[in-house]
Image (spheres, rainbow, N blue to C red):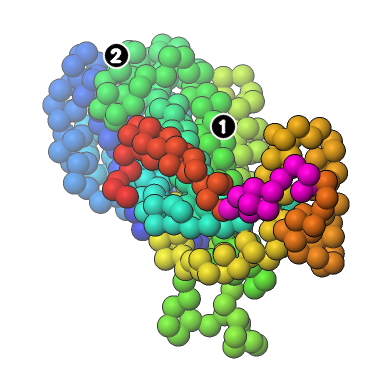
Amino acid sequence: MIPRYTRPEMAAIWDPQTRYRIWFEIEAHAADAMAELGVIPKAAAKAIWEKGKHAKFDVARIDAIEREVKHDVIAFLTHLAEIVGPQARFVHQGMTSSDVLDTCLNVQLVRAADLLIADVDALMVALKRRAFEHKMTPIIGRSHGIHAEPTTFGLKLAYAYAEFFRAKERLISARTEVATCAISGAVGTFAQVDPRVEEHVAQAMGLAVEPVSTQIIPRDRHAMYFATLAVVAASVERLATEVRHLQRTEVLEAEEFFSEGQKGSSAMPHKRNPVLSENVTGLARMVRAYVMPALENVALWHERDISHSSVERMSAPDATVTLDFVLARLTGIIDKLVVYPANMQQNLERLGGLIHSQRVMLALTQKGVAREEAYAIVQRNAMRAWKGDSDFFSSLAADKEVRRHLSEAELKENFELAHHFKHVDTIFERVFGKLAAASDPGPG
């Protein structure tokens, strides 16, 4: 985790003190269940809770013990014994390290998912507000980066809203996928620990029981979790890339907010660069980079090995912290995005009406002209206009084959922008009616 790209609430999930607190809770809840089953004295379970509940674990002390014993869970248990006293001999009865490590990791991933879901909700609120603000703001739609047909800026934001609605659903599913607990002992057979202990710990920690573990929780669950983060990051980059394109000098239909005193370049005082969107783009790549290691973690040796452990110590905090940061940053970008409707209109008119070529072609087919012939008629006039030899409308109006089928009034009708926006309400109802009702991320 790099402090520059880390927000406090997410960082706290991965703080060593938080990790040891979760380890303690797993051990203490397991002790409660064992006490109820008569495996350990009830007084021991009570003492474990009383001594450890409000303890501040000494991270430096645990690290020092680990340097000697070369085992992180044993180091923690040794330190816990220093806090609890003689009753600590009843801690970790029949359990193995993975019971603690894997259950803890899943608790942390669940908490991280909750923050990420809230992040997406906040982004959706911003997208919804700006989408309705620019619901009918005309803008040119582009395919291959080339002017295609008109759309609205509100629709661009509605597309993003719908995409992040899907992102939220995927995060909820990934949270469920990874929210399991395993307290099954060595090689997962429950030989030394009763399955009812696992059931009790799972319920206490807000998890489901892992149906069958092999000493570890199967890593296909985690692979799906990190793959989901990667897909969300891809959606983040898609929207950030759109902002970057719209901010290009030749386009300048929207740009990131440029604050008072902000500087864009050390060399050129005039620069206003899309640095936030570029930052988000780069960080999204880092989130996606953790998918392959997560997939490779699935294939472990027999009932367990620890080749996955070193990966997850890096990937779990880094991927969740980074995605949390980029979602929050993207929300700020959208919330403060500066929009230039006049530039959008100017760009719409840049090709002198060529963006209406399909409408004219279809109008000719409606008059009985074969589609191939209509295409050829419109294209030859469009290419003249493209080269700057004539105005598209004037060229069409002077074309005898066009005028044989379309009057000047009919031609003008096919150059009206409003035609392209007649179903915007329908699309908005689909997105902000049905989808918003299912998600309800907040008022528009």
Under mark 1, the amino acid is Ala
Provide residue 32's location: percent of width, then percent of height: 21, 24
Residue 223's tag is 1
The answer to whether any part of residue 364 appears in the image is yes
- Give the residue at x 48% y 24%: 217
Front one among 397 and 224: 397
Q: Is residue 407 part of the magenta span, yes or no?
A: yes
Distance from Cα at disc 2 to Cα at disc 1: 28 Å
Q: Is residue 46 above or below residue 272?
A: above
**Can you tell which of label 2 and label 1 is closer to the viewer?**
1
Under mark 2, the amino acid is Arg
Provide residue 202's location: percent of width, then percent of height: 31, 24
Magenta-tinted stretch: 402-416
Front one among 298 and 231: 231
Residue 196's tag is 2
Provide residue 175's location: percent of width, then percent of height: 42, 32
In the displayed structure image, the side of residue 361 where residue 432 appears, left or right: left
Q: Is residue 205 part of the magenta span, yes or no?
A: no
Dot 1 alpha-carbon crowd within 10 angstroms: few under 14, some 14 to 19, many 20 or more: many
The answer to whether any part of residue 238 appears in the image is no
Q: Is residue 22 above or below residue 138?
A: above
> Which quadrant of the figure has residue 344?
bottom right
- Give the residue at x 43% y 42%: 425
**SS for dot 1:** helix
Provide residue 102's location: percent of width, then percent of height: 44, 31
**SS for dot 2:** helix
